[in-house]
Image (cartoon, coloured by chain):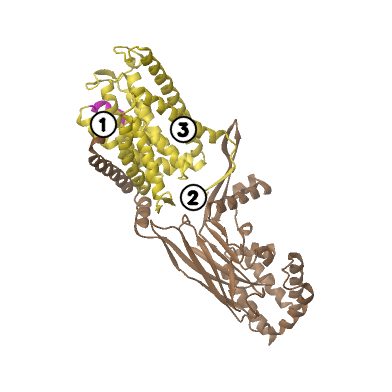
Chain colours: A brown, B yellow
Amino acid sequence: MRTKGILIGVTRMAACLCALIVVSSAAPKVWSLGEEAHAGPARIDERRTKARTKKQMGPRRPSGTRRPEIKAQAPQAGPVERIEADVSTRSVEVTTAFTGHEILVFGSIDNSQQPGDESGYYNIVVVVEGTPEPTVVRRKSDVAGLWINTSSVIFASVPSYYAIASTRPIDEIAGPNVLDKHAIGFAHIKMTPVPSYQWSFGEEALAAFKAAVIRLKRQEGFYIMEARDGVTFIGRSLFRSTIALPANVPVGPLVARVFLFRDGEVISAHIARVTLERTGLERLLHSFAFRYPFAYGIFAVLLAVLSGLLASAYFRRAVR
Amino acid sequence: MNIYLPIAEMSVSVVLFLGLGWAVGFLSGLFGVGGGFLLTPLLIFMGIPSAVAVGTGSMHIVASSVSGAIAQYQRNNVDIKMGFVLVAGGVFGSAIGVGIVRILRDIGQFDLFVALSYVTFLGAVGALMMIESVGTIRKARSGQPVSTRKTGQHSWVHGLPFKMRFHRSKLYISAVPPALIGAFVGFMAAVMGIGGGFVMVPAMIYLLRVPTNVVVGTSLFQIVFVMAVTTVLQAVQNQTVDVVLALLLIIGGVIGAQFGAAAGGRLKGEQLRFLLAALVILMCLRIGWDLVARPNELFSITPMLGVVK
C-alpha cells in the first residue's frame, strides 16, 4: 500500500517535471530520481542529509532534531503534496502609456503538512521568464587607444526577461545541481553558445561572457531578483508573490514556473502563462513598421512634411 | 508623464524629449543650422539605440527643413537643376549608407563608426569655423572690409566632363562635382542622421562657386528630398524610424526654433559662427572622450538581428 502511494507520487512528480523541463537532456535525470526513490526511503534520507550538511540550512531545524522528524513523517508519505498556482493578470497590455506592471503569483499546496506560515517546512520558488532569444555579447578592448568591440559570442537562447522570487535565498533551498536542472537562479539560466563560438573560446572566457549577460540584463532591469521574502506563506498552504514587469520589458509571452521544494528537492511544480502584448496605437505602429516597412516609411515622411508645414503656418514669422 | 516608443521599445519621459527637441530647435534657430548633428548624438546619450537615433533623426530633419525649403523656393532661391543633380547623387549615397548601417549593425561596429564619423566631421568643421570666425572678428575689429567672396576663378573643378549649364547659379560646370557632393552628403545622412548642410553649403560655395543667395535654398531643397528618401530606406532596410519619438522632437523643436531665431537676431554673424564652432568642438570632444576613455563596462549585449547561423 505504502509503496503504491510512493509510486503514484513519483509518477506524478515525474510527469510534472517532464512537462516543465524544456531541455530533453534533463529527462533521464528525472528517471534516475525515480529509481532512487524506488530504492527505499532510507536512501532518500541519506541524500537529504548530505544535501543538508553541505548547505547549512537555517537555524530553525538543528541537525539533532532533524532525523526523527523525517522518520516520523515517513509513514504519512501517502498523500503527496501538490502545488497549484495562478497569476493575477493573464494578459498584460503594452500601450503607449505603459509604465510597467506588477503581477501577483499566488497558489496553494495540496496536502500541506507544514504547521504554519513561519515553519520553513517548504520552500517555494517563483520564476517568471520571457521568450528566449538569440543574443550577441560583445567585448571591447583597447586597440591603438580606442575602445573597440573586438570579440563576440552568440548565445542561442537567452531569456529576454527573468524574475525570481523565493521564500529564502535559493542557494539555501537547494544544491547547484537541482537549480541547474530547473534553471532556477541567474547563475543557472541555460545559455548555450552557438557551436562555432564554443570552440574558439575557453571555458573561462565563455563564463565571463555569460556573467556579462546576467550583469547587463540586471542593470537594464530585465533580470530581477525579488528581495528577501519574495514569496510569503499565508497560513499553512496559501502563498503569494509579486513580480515586477519594468516599463521597458521585452514584449512577448511570459511563463511563470512555481516550484515546491522540500529538503532540497523539487516535489511539485506548476506552470502558468502570461501574455504580454502590444495593444492599441502601440501595436498598430509596431506591426505597421515591421509588416509594411515601405508604407510606414512613406507615412513617416508625410507625417514629417505635414507637421513641418503646420508648424511653420502656425509660426508664420519663423520662416527665414 | 511617460510614453512608450514603439520602435525604440522603451518608455521615455514626454517632457524630457519635448525639452530635448526644444533645446535642439533653439540652437538650430539661433545658428540657422539643421540641428541633426546635435540631435543624433544627444539621442544616443539619452539611451536611444544609435541606429534608431540615426533613422529617426532623418525624419526629424524632413520636418524641420520642409517649410524653409518651400519658402526659399517661393523666393526663387533654389537652383532646381543643380538641386536635382545633388538629389540624384544624394539618393545614391544614401542607399549605400543605409546598406552599410545594416552591415555594421550585424558585425557590431555601428556605434564605433558613428562615433568616429562624428569626431572626424565635427572636429574638422568646428576647427575650420572657429578659425574663420576668429579671423573675421579680428578683421572686423581692425576695421577691414569683411567680404571675401572671389568670382571668376577657375580650379580643377572646371576641367571635368559632363558639363552642364546651371542658369540660376550662373555656372557652366561639370555635373560630376555636384553629384559627388550630393552622394557624400547622402551617405553621411544615412550613417550619421544629419542633413549635411554644414558640409554642403561650404562645398558649394568654395568648390562649385555657387552664388551665396542660391546656396541655402538649393541645399535645403536637396536635404528635404534626400532625407525623405533616407527615411523611407531606413524604415525598409533597418526598421529604425520611430514616428512617436520623431513627433515629440518635432513639436519641441518647432517651438524652440522660434525662440532661437529671435535670440539669433541680436547677435552678429561671426559671433554666432564662433559660438556654433565652440559647440561643435565640445560635441566632438564629448564623443571622442567615450572612444578613448576606458569604459566601466567592457561588455555589451544586443538581440540578434538576423537568423542564427
Relative vertical location of residue B269 with respect to residue A60 in this rendering, above or below: above
Where disc 2 sits, the SS reads: loop
* Residue B63 magenta: no
Marks 3 and 2 share the same chain: yes
> Of tags 3 and 2, which is closer to the observer?
3
Residue where numbered disc 1 is placed: A320
Q: Residues within 10 Å of mark 3 (few under 14, many from 20)?
A: many
Relative vertical location of residue A111 with respect to residue B296 in this rendering, above or below: below
* Chain holding disc 3: B
Residue where numbered disc 3 is placed: B283
The reply to whether discs 3 and 2 touch (Cβ–Cβ < 8 Å) is no
What amino acid type should be assigned to the residue bearing mark 1? Arg
* Farthest residue, direction right: A64
- Tell which of A232 and A94 is nearer to you: A232
Q: Residues within 10 Å of mark 2 (few under 14, many from 20)?
A: few
Q: For the point 34% across and 28% down, which residue is it? A: B182
Where disc 1 sits, the SS reads: loop
What amino acid type should be assigned to the residue bearing mark 3? Met
Relative vertical location of residue A278 with respect to residue A68 in this rendering, above or below: above
Q: Which corner quadrant of the image does residue B171 belong to?
A: top left
What amino acid type should be assigned to the residue bearing mark 2? Val
* Chain holding disc 1: A
Residue where numbered disc 2 is placed: B307
Which part of the image, by quadrant, shows the N terminus of chain B? bottom left
Residue B255 spot, x, y in % from top left: 31, 41
Residue A19 spot, x, y in % from top left: 56, 70
Q: Which corner quadrant of the image does residue B185 belong to?
A: top left
